Image (tube, rainbow, N blue to C red):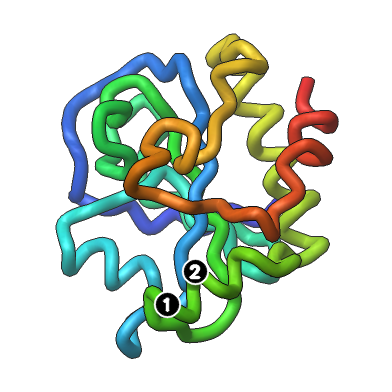
Amino acid sequence: MKVIKRYSGIGGGTQTPTKLIIHAMSEILGGKHAEEFLKDVGLSAHFLLCPDGSFIKLRKTTEIAWHCKGFNTNSVGIEILVEGEHTYETFLQKIKTDYVTDAQKEALVEMSNGIIEYFDIAHEDVLRHSDVSPERKYDPGTGFDWEDFKSKLI
């Protein structure tokens, strides 16, 4: 598994994660790569999962990332990057389809299992962004086979 470290200064102090939250966002938004877009709007995640299965690590897992309102101080956030450039509307349509590449599926399971094991995160505390903010968020969407993913976790 390839991890590219490009630490973001966006976030808070230290944390001990008790949750893992899976997100999705467009790989390119408004002509900017997701990493640049997040920085411009003052947000962060711990990892961006690229379509080729590599990760961009923006924050240490023991550091707070600003990725999930109400859960930033006790969770690790992984953003699955939806290939290509999208508006919010096309993104919402795309995450209703099977958008996750095989490389992303494999890498996500491997990374998630490492995080779960290291921090002793309970299976029920592996959540979707839409689970913790159902009135505001739709990601990672119905196009991501959540049950299959969860069945592969330790």
Mark 1 crowd level (few <14, some 14–19, many ≥20, 10 Å Cα): few
Separation (CA) of disc 2 from disc 1: 5 Å
Image spot of residue 37 (x, y percent): 28, 71
Q: Are marks 2 and 1 in contact (CB under 8 Å)?
A: yes
Q: Quadrant of residue 146?
A: top right
Quadrant of the snapshot with the C terminus: top right
Image spot of residue 83 (x, y percent): 59, 77
Dot 1: what SS?
helix
- Up-down relation of residue 90 to residue 135 (above or below): below
Which disc number belongs to residue 89?
A: 1
Q: Residue at x 17, y 63 (%)?
A: 41
Task: Identify the residue at the far bottom of this view.
Answer: 31
Residue tagged by mark 2?
92
Q: Is residue 122 left or right of residue 45?
A: right
Dot 2: what SS?
helix
Q: Quadrant of residue 59?
A: top left
Image spot of residue 148 (x, y percent): 83, 40
Q: Is residue 16 left or right of residue 57?
A: left
Q: Residue at x 57, y 14 (%)?
A: 121
Of the pair 79 and 118, the residue shown nearer to us: 79
Q: Residue at x 28, y 63 (%)?
A: 38
Of the pair 82 and 131, the residue shown nearer to us: 131
- Up-down relation of residue 76 to residue 40 (above or below): above
Q: Residue at x 61, y 11 (%)?
A: 122
Image spot of residue 95 (x, y percent): 59, 65
- Up-down relation of residue 39 to residue 126 (above or below): below
Q: Quadrant of residue 40?
A: bottom left
Three-letter residue code for mark 2: Leu
Task: Identify the residue at the far front of this view.
Answer: 135
Of the pair 77 and 142, the residue shown nearer to us: 142
Mark 2 crowd level (few <14, some 14–19, many ≥20, 10 Å Cα): many
Three-letter residue code for mark 1: Glu
